[in-house]
Amino acid sequence: MQRLRPLDEQECYLRCYGWVGGDDAVRVRRPGDDEPEGVAVLTERIRLAFEARLEGRAEAA
């Protein structure tokens, strides 16, 4: 296969890893940061579901 032009480092990185940034980036939140009430409730539900799944794995083993 013949390339039409050589790729620079930035183009290679973007082809391998995709765009990093913008609205789709992960943001780390610290306890005490202002957050909507719905986010706190959802976070707690995820934590409880994860703990229940871990307990289920321990009982099955």
Image (cartoon, rainbow, N blue to C red):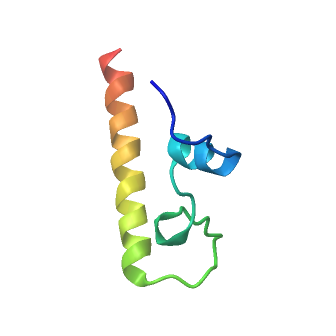
In which quadrant is the N terminus drawn? top left
Does residue 29 appear to the left or right of 4 in the view shown?
right
Q: In this picture, is 51 found above or below 26?
A: above
At x 37% / y 55%, what residue is drawn? 46
**Quarter of the rendering containing residue 55:** top left
Q: Position of residue 23 (x, y in %)?
A: 48, 72
Does residue 29 appear to the left or right of 52 in the view shown?
right
Q: In this picture, is 15 found above or below 32?
A: above
Q: Position of residue 5 (x, y in %)?
A: 57, 42
Residue lying furthest right in this view?
9
In which quadrant is the C terminus drawn? top left
Q: In this picture, is 31 found above or below 35?
A: above
Depth check: 11 or 59 in front? 11
Depth check: 39 or 55 in front? 39
Depth check: 14 or 29 in front? 14
At x 62% / y 40%, what residue is drawn? 6
Q: In this picture, is 57 found above or below 21?
A: above
Q: Position of residue 21 (x, y in %)?
A: 57, 65
At x 33% / y 22%, what residue is drawn? 59
Depth check: 28 or 33 in front? 28
**Quarter of the rendering containing residue 45:** bottom left
Residue lying furthest top in this view?
61
At x 64% / y 78%, what residue is drawn? 32
Q: Please state the total of marks drawn on the protein image.
A: 0
